[in-house]
Image: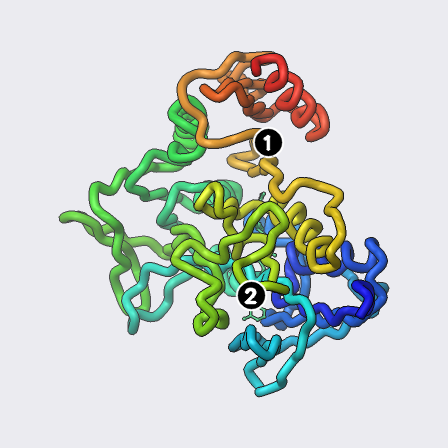
Amino acid sequence: MSATDRRIVIVGDSIAGCTAARELRARGHRGSIVMIGADADGCYARPPLSKHMLKGEAAEAETWDMADLDLTSIVDPAVSLDAETRTVTTADGTAVPYDALIVASGASARRIAAPDQAGETVLRTFADVRALRPTLDEASTAIVVGAGFLGMEVASACVARGTAVTVVDVDPPLQRLLGSFLSDAIVARAEAASVEFVRADTPVALVGDPVTGIEFADRTLTADLVVTCAGDEPQTGWLDSTGIADRIGVGIDYRCATDIPGIYAAGDVAYSRTASRRAPFWSNAVAQGKVAAASALGIEPTCAPTDDYFWTEILGLSIKVVGPLPLQGDPTVLEGSVDDGSALLQWTHQDGRTTIVAFGIKKPVGLLRRLARENTLSTT
Ligand SMILES: Cc1cc2nc3c(=O)[nH]c(=O)nc-3n(C[C@H](O)[C@H](O)[C@H](O)COP(=O)(O)OP(=O)(O)OC[C@H]3O[C@@H](n4cnc5c(N)ncnc54)[C@H](O)[C@@H]3O)c2cc1C
């Protein structure tokens, strides 16, 4: 069989899966592509969900039209994989055979409610946003559990809508990845916008059934709305019988190949075996989607299997980061001032690599990439 005649199945129809499908066609695959999804809303971008959509600036999700790719789309979750017979089975019992499989089933929101506790609110899907928006319209007070990127974006939406918001975490906001320097700058900005931070000294539990608040140590806090932003978990349940996934996700090599021949993985579900952790960001999912597609065709990829660019928007401030994380210590200020909310910053890591951060300053991503690359080369 020629490589271009292979039947390729992609499980997951979000950015990693859709990028893989587009790359398969772009690299000359003329055989069949079957894309299996689980979300009735189809293929759409997640980053706007917690930004424009939650603030009420956009009503509909940004969807992608895949009609030009001549693929077979199945909207019915994959429930099992038989790697011996090379077959994926979906919930209604449909058996989908493949020659190569790309696992792009992403991640789901990590939940902290007790098993029988109702009313936990999370933000991962368009359906979550639809459910959350009317509650946010009514709420005067909100608690956000988790001060990571998502938690801070949800808190920003609360501020934009005039809802008093308290953010609760065991760590200072974003400190684990962005370090104390940027965490402090973000806290100062958030507190100026009346966001209250509460540091929990024990993990937070939800109280009420349905949920009305949180508790930790000897404290209980209540609010009209409680949103859990406590990270995400790789969607690997359908792979359980294969041994291909572990606690972290699906381990991959530099070709996005898993341990099982003919199976590749990309995006939030996957982790690089050399790093032993997932990098659940948009650009990484795009890069891995392209590499997994090329590898499924047995040809050279056109890009690296990682892309360390990501962005977020916190309290009207755009933050773009290119380079390795976490950040430690203070940066070199290349331009502007953090206090003024407009600065170009550089961190040089011990191994000579560089991270560039555009903190509220308008800079094209290409420039940030070039600075990170050039400054790294000059220090090694
Ligand atoms: C609200 C929000 C805001 C974000 N903002 C940013 C940002 O500003 N910048 C940034 O860099 N990143 C951001 N991210 C992260 C980014 O969106 C993810 O890294 C990206 O969506 C990962 O894409 P993916 O295709 O790997 O997985 P996912 O987007 O998780 O998609 C996986 C798809 O697989 C489907 N699926 C799961 N299980 C099955 C199954 N068994 N069978 C069939 N289909 C299945 C799911 O329904 C889903 O559609 C944000 C994420 C969220 C949730």
Q: Residue furthest front?
A: 1
**Of the numbered discs in the image, which one, if any, rests on residue 320?**
1
**For residue 196, what is the image quadrant?**
top left
Residue 368, percent from left and from top: 66, 25
Q: Residue furthest bottom?
A: 93
Q: Residue furthest left?
A: 218
The residue depicted at 42 percent of the width and 51 percent of the height is: 231
Asked whether 320 or 126 is in front, the reply is 320
Residue 12, percent from left and from top: 61, 65
SS under mark 2? helix
Residue 325, percent from left and from top: 48, 32
Looking at the rendered structure, the kind of residue marked 2 is Ala
The span from disc 2 to disc 1 (Cα, nearest Å) is 27 Å
SS under mark 1? strand
Rendered-image quadrant of the N terminus: bottom right
Q: Residues within 10 Å of mark 2 (few under 14, many from 20)?
A: some
Residue occupied by mark 2 = 127
